[in-house]
Amino acid sequence: MTILGIPVLTAITFLPLAGAVVLCLVPRGEEAWIRRIAFGVGVLDFLWSLWLLQGFVVGEAGYQFQERQQWVPGLKIGYFLGVDGISLWLVLLTTFLTAIAILSSFAAVTEKVKAYYACLLLLETGMLGVFLALDLVLFYVFWEGMLIPMYFLIGVWGGPRRIYATVKFVLYTMAGGVLMLVAIIALYFLGGQTFDLTQLAAQDFAPGAQRWLFAAFALAFAIKVPMWPFHTWLPDAHVEAPTAGSVILAGVLLKMGTYGFLRFALPLFPGATREFAPLVLALAVIGILYGALVSMVQPDLKKLVAYSSVSHLGFVMLGMFAFTVQGVEGSLLQMINHGLSTGGLFLLVGMVYERRHSRMIADFGGLWGVMPVFAALFLVVTLSSIGLPGLNGFVGEFLILSGAFGARPWFTAFATLGVVLGAVYMLWMFQRVVFGVVTHEENRRLRDLTPREYAVLIPVIAAIVWIGIYPDPVLRRMEPSVRAVVLRVNSAGRPAADISPALDSASAAASPVAAAAGGR
């Protein structure tokens, strides 16, 4: 499949880069045209990414739309792209949220407008490359390359402590990235001098090598997730980032860590994955409870939402390391759900900040009477975040908990407390911001949503409701690829006769669970 004669994955990945180049040619004073061009590129890339749904073969576990060219033949480094049921929805999430983030910043960004939108588009190319690259060196280039535009988005357009936040973010990420690079080079020599993921994933490395390589990859991905105790860069980055930066950071960048585990760590090192599973699960449960408890005491709206990500992504790791079909499906679905619900929360916080120039919960109250439409949409996104049945968060959490309970009952039991705590801190926050009487005169003059803000929020709300009511199209496309990863991990070091019954049992459980969640 091609777009204008260009292979589809290349076109989707590099259209934002081309858009950034076009922006550089627009005269500096034409800010209105700069915004229109950036948004047009974002929307066009999202529409192009929808072509993948049209041509995607449901029921196939392998990589589709593959593009392969030699890049550095002497080292067997290739330009190798592909998409499967795991990466498909993350690509769509990236293009969708980037277009939304661009539109959301039309009124908020008034300085260095050209550079701002060029950075957003460059960041989109980096994120898409991470989700589509199947050569480890190419993946690493995109992984590290996306740090540059994110560094400038926070460092130039961020808050008062933006330099501290952006340096901390880059140093944390690069520290893990360097170790991952060492592991990639080691894989090259251990795997027959190839960086091709499909070839490396078909090999069985020695247990000792797997442990060290898994540790190196896992540290890089754990920092990006971020898992406790590698999470400390996240609240600073979120609080200081502009609204669009927070939306992209929470909605997409954090998923690069969870995606890395699912795409690389699990299939490349299945034996080590099983050995390290108790440690990863313990850190995930700690993150779930820690993130919820810390969120509960935050006075800053943005910091509360930031710490909630630590808790929510702990559930993603719980489902993934349960090694059951429905647990991993729930984990992948929750990556998408978190991008929509938390991205929506950051958009709403940004809108009220533009009006009030404050994010302190104590500065609000009584907004339902002043901004009723804003309050109603805020309620929908809040309920999505806590997993209300009928909205997207419920489907993901239900699959994760049901899939993990049979395999990891004690970890799941403790993690369930995080669901309760999540409802407590989110609803308490909503009560203090929206209900009650107006206690600050400045809030009486706040205007409700503008037409542009409707255009920003309505697509997000629509996606939240659609997945909550009818998740079947999403789950059907991811299931074969998820099943292949689960089989790979569960087969590590076990006789073939022991593998099929366990996988069949997990699959049988998955069908009624998914049917209950959305008519599957």
Image (cartoon, rainbow, N blue to C red):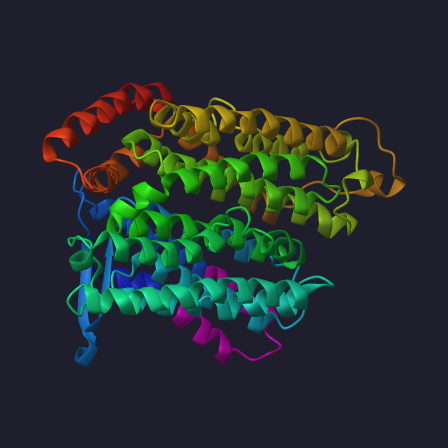
Q: Is residue 369 left or right of residue 14?
A: right
Image location (x, y in percent) of residue 146:
45, 66
Q: Is residue 496 left or right of residue 298?
A: left
Please tell me which residue lies in front, 1 or 338: 338
Q: Is residue 65 left or right of residue 407?
A: left
246 is within the stretch colored magenta: no
Residue at the far left: name it: 497
Image location (x, y in percent) of residue 48:
32, 55
The quarter in which the C terminus is drawn is: top left
Q: Residue drawn 63% across and 73% down?
A: 112
Rendering quarter of residue 158: bottom right
Q: Residue drawn 30% across and 51% down?
A: 263
**Figure disc tally:** 0
Q: Residue drawn 62% across and 77% down?
A: 29
Q: Is residue 346 above or below residue 169?
A: above
Image location (x, y in percent) of residue 75:
20, 77
The quarter in which the N terminus is drawn is: bottom left
Rendering quarter of residue 397: top left
Span shown in magenta: 17-40
Would residue 188 be seen by someone viewing this image from the given angle?
yes
Q: Is residue 125 above or below residue 344?
A: below
Q: Is residue 224 above or below residue 492?
A: below
Please tell me which residue lies in front, 90 or 497: 497
Q: Residue drawn 26% across and 39% down?
A: 482
35 is within the stretch colored magenta: yes
Q: Is residue 56 above or below residue 371?
A: below
Please tell me which residue lies in front, 84 or 122: 84
State the predominant SS element of the stretch in magenta.
Answer: helix
Would residue 374 be seen by someone viewing this image from the given angle?
no
Image location (x, y in percent) of residue 374:
66, 37
